[in-house]
Image (cartoon, helix red, strand yellow):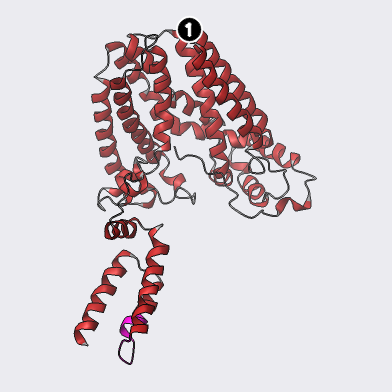
Amino acid sequence: MLSAKMTCLLTMNALRRIYPGPYLYSLSNCFLHKEGGRTIHNIHSETRILRRMLYRQSAIHPSIRQCKTQHYGRRSLSLSAATVVNSAPAPVKPYLQLMRLDKPIGTWLLYLPCTWSIALAADPGCLPDLGMLALFGMGALLMRGAGCTINDMWDKDFDKKVSRTAIRPIASGEISRMQALVFLGGQLSLALGVLLCLNYYSIALGAASLSLVISYPLMKRITYWPQFVLGLTFNWGALLGWSAVKGCCDWSVCLPLYFSGVMWTLIYDTIYAHQDKEDDVKVGIRSTALRFQEQTKPWLSGFTAAMMSGLVVAGVTAEQTLPYYAVLSIAAVHLTRQVPEGLPEHLDTKQPGVDTTRIHRAHKQNKDAGGGEQKRAVDAHCDNCQGTSSNTNKQVPGDRHLLYVDT
């Protein structure tokens, strides 16, 4: 009996280290607080509770999920980026989170314009240079991480005031600014190593983008168009990819391609900015979401038309053939369907079912802190919302926020 209790105690301690959840108290009662002996019925009851706890938590806690797959011999062939980060050693994990390694969509958004340019620069009838694609993939990963580090260093005080960003490593105090600066130096050094693998023209062109990487986080303090500056930064690969393959830029191809990438960034990052509208107003940060307000959908439709026009011009100049325009047609249909119809009440504060009370309260609280331009924008916004239905302040079920990408 004593050995059984000792075994139970060790089991409970191990489980508490993995998950300090409420089910452990039920397990404790089953394991340790039985007045009589343990019967077969009790053992089955304990087993059911343990299985229920592991099943419910396996989707949340990566260590439990990993233990479960190892036990049953069903190890996943592909681990998500978030799983890799969560399984990293404790001293390393905050740095991986700082460079957003657990959110790879931002790296893809930085990498894709590079692939467009490299593919267009390929010789007719040939596939893109796979070595160059791999090199730019590594560069995109490092520079996206460096950009996120710079952004968090600039925005430490702002991030503390926004619920979505308060848990970031610098804002939460897990990493100091000095540690982040050293980490930034390491990332930029590795990125420089990648850049030095290119020709001299591309090295100079790539180095020129660093000014945009550093200055972008400041734009949200001085203009309602920080997404435009982000587009200039994120799509620099549309210029760099061509020069890396050809030795220099053909501006008749690269500029329309670069322009299309900037329009694309304005589309997705304006959508993304709508989830932080209330917090942005409170802390005095500006964005295209606050600039466009109820006119977001027409603006996004205009950006979509401009993006597709630029891609067509780039294709014509680069002498692309039918497959290129077929892919463009598919993309155009997809964007045409998604931009007007896929963004309902989230983007229109005059739509019934949207909770505008907090938005207006935040606008009024920060009205005097943003200067004359922001005062006029706040007044215009609130005037436009006059006469809205009484149902406007009722929140619809489900998540009201847009969840797109954390760049």
Question: Magenta region: which residues?
Answer: 28-39
Left/right of residue 103 with respect to residue 301 in the rendered view: left
State whether residue 388 is above or below residue 194.
below
Question: Residue sitting at 25 percent across and 78 percent down?
Answer: 9
Of residues 256 and 295, which is closer to you in this image?
Answer: 256
Q: Dividing the image into 4 quarters, which one contains the C terminus?
A: top left
Question: Is residue 404 a member of the stretch shown in magenta?
Answer: no
Q: Dividing the image into 4 quarters, which one contains the N terminus?
A: bottom left
Left/right of residue 70 with respect to residue 103 in the rendered view: left
Query: Residue 199 appears in which quarter of the rendering?
Result: top left
User: Residue pushed farthest bottom?
Assistant: 36
For label 1, the SS is loop
Residue 229 image position (x, y, % from top left): 48, 26
Identify residue type, mark 1.
Glu
Question: Residue sitting at 57 percent across and 19 percent down?
Answer: 308
Question: Residue sitting at 24 percent across and 52 percent down?
Answer: 89
Residue 342 image position (x, y, % from top left): 62, 38
For disc 1, the marked residue is: 319
Residue 201 image position (x, y, % from top left): 31, 11
Residue count near mark 1 (Cα–Cα under 10 Å), binned few <14, some 14–19, many ≥20: few
Of residues 194 and 388, which is closer to you in this image?
Answer: 194
